[in-house]
Amino acid sequence: MISEFWDQFINYIGIMKIAIILGTRPEIIKMSPIIRKCVKDNLDFFILHTGQHYSYDLDQVFFERLHLPNSRYNINAGSGQHGEQTGKMIIEIEKILNIEKPGIVLVQGDTNTVLAGAVAASKMNIKVAHIEAGLRSYDRAMPEEINRILTDHCSDYLFAPTEKSKEILINEGVSKDNIFVTGNTIVDAVYENLDLAKDQDNIFNKIGLEKKNYFLVTAHRQENVDNPEKIKGILKALIEIKSRFNVPIVFPIHPRTKKRMEEFNFKLNFLTLIEPLSYFDFLNIESEAKLILTDSGGVQEEACILKIPCVTLRTNTERPETLEVGSNILAGTDSFKIINSVNYMLKVEKSWKNPFGNGKAANKIIEILKEFDR
């Protein structure tokens, strides 16, 4: 009787107020299962959007299509140098946390938004929970790597997607009592949204694509798109791949990438260039591709989940699990290696096991937070 009453009381008062801080398209997608769980459980939470991605196509459309509640705050940080952008975010986030006084801040991933949210909260003695903790590329030239490390080491709850991520954190001196292996919320997002996406697959007719008969390319990493030699290597490989396989190469071009291509005066007429896609359209394009070439960590994960062979246009990855199960290969930006990697991955059996969990990461994360707030 007492136990039953206590459970009812806990359910009644709920857990502490949660601040969900996000600012980019991948964060919206990966946080969407967490947000839905908060709504379902009637938790006290709010969304703070930094505006790191600030165009309609890359931002607001995701809230609408994913049927998520709008952010309570948007600080419109916009673009800028890393220090400038991160500093502006910290200043504005601190003001909002002072108003709302949440008990915990949730951040996901490795962007400037994530670091700013974690720093602002930890300086105010607000608990920080880092979703997707413990990822490492071991390349400190990547701004994202610095963001991951610093965020992990000022977090109170570290939600690692895999045992490998947990081991990395322990080896860096993080207490194992603060680490929880939950799987990755990207699996939740793919499972929750794939069926809905399939009901809206007119993107193939719109672009004129035959399912399973095209390659998909994405490129947006600063270390790639800001370097003309690296871009040249990627494009040289794509020209040869187009000639050798005679299939469309679809490239939803990121605004940053488009700007750099124009500055470098590179010709892209051999590619099927399209504007950034809605999440559902991109999920459809991913799920029916013959092969994916990308420098995105999230796309590496999604390709693995969707059983699509992946060639990563980097020499390192913070998703080594994809290499271990055989869904992915590192090619860098050397044209010869990219072409060889494509040839290799097209012959791979698509029988690998998804290493990122069973699609219940969001539920695990919220239940852990409930338990520790009692």
Image (tube, rainbow, N blue to C red):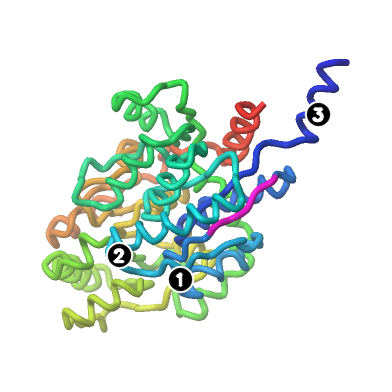
Point out which mark residue 9 bears: 3
Residue depicted at x 57% and y 75%:
202
Residue depicted at x 17% and y 59%:
333
Identity of the amino acid at label 3?
Answer: Phe
Q: Which marked residue is nearer to the observer: mark 2 or mark 3?
A: 3
Instruction: Kindly state the secondary structure of the residue where label 2 is placed.
Output: loop
Please tell me how crowded label 2 is: few (under 14), some (14-19), or many (20+) other residues with Cα within 10 Å.
many
Q: Nearer the viewer, residue 191 or 110?
A: 110
Q: Earlier in the sequence, mark 2 or mark 3?
A: 3
Q: Earlier in the sequence, mark 1 or mark 2?
A: 1
Q: Is residue 247 left or right of residue 52?
A: left
Instruction: Kindly state the secondary structure of the residue where label 3 is placed.
Output: helix
Please tell me how crowded label 3 is: few (under 14), some (14-19), or many (20+) other residues with Cα within 10 Å.
few
Q: Position of residue 231 (x, y in %)?
A: 18, 68
Point out which mark residue 313 bears: none
Distance between the alpha carbons at the discs numbered 3 and 1: 41 Å
Q: Which marked residue is nearer to the observer: mark 1 or mark 2?
A: 1
Identity of the amino acid at label 2?
Answer: Ala
Identity of the amino acid at label 1?
Answer: Tyr
Query: Mark 2 sits on what residue?
Result: 219
Question: Compared with residue 56, is residue 113 higher up or lower down, i.e. above or below?
Answer: above
Q: Can you say which quadrant of the picture contains the N terminus? A: top right
Query: Mark 1 sits on what residue?
Result: 54
Query: What range is drawn magenta here?
Result: 44-48
Distance between the alpha carbons at the discs numbered 2 and 3: 50 Å
Residue depicted at x 67% and y 26%:
374
Distance between the alpha carbons at the discs numbered 1 and 2: 19 Å
Q: Earlier in the sequence, mark 3 or mark 1?
A: 3
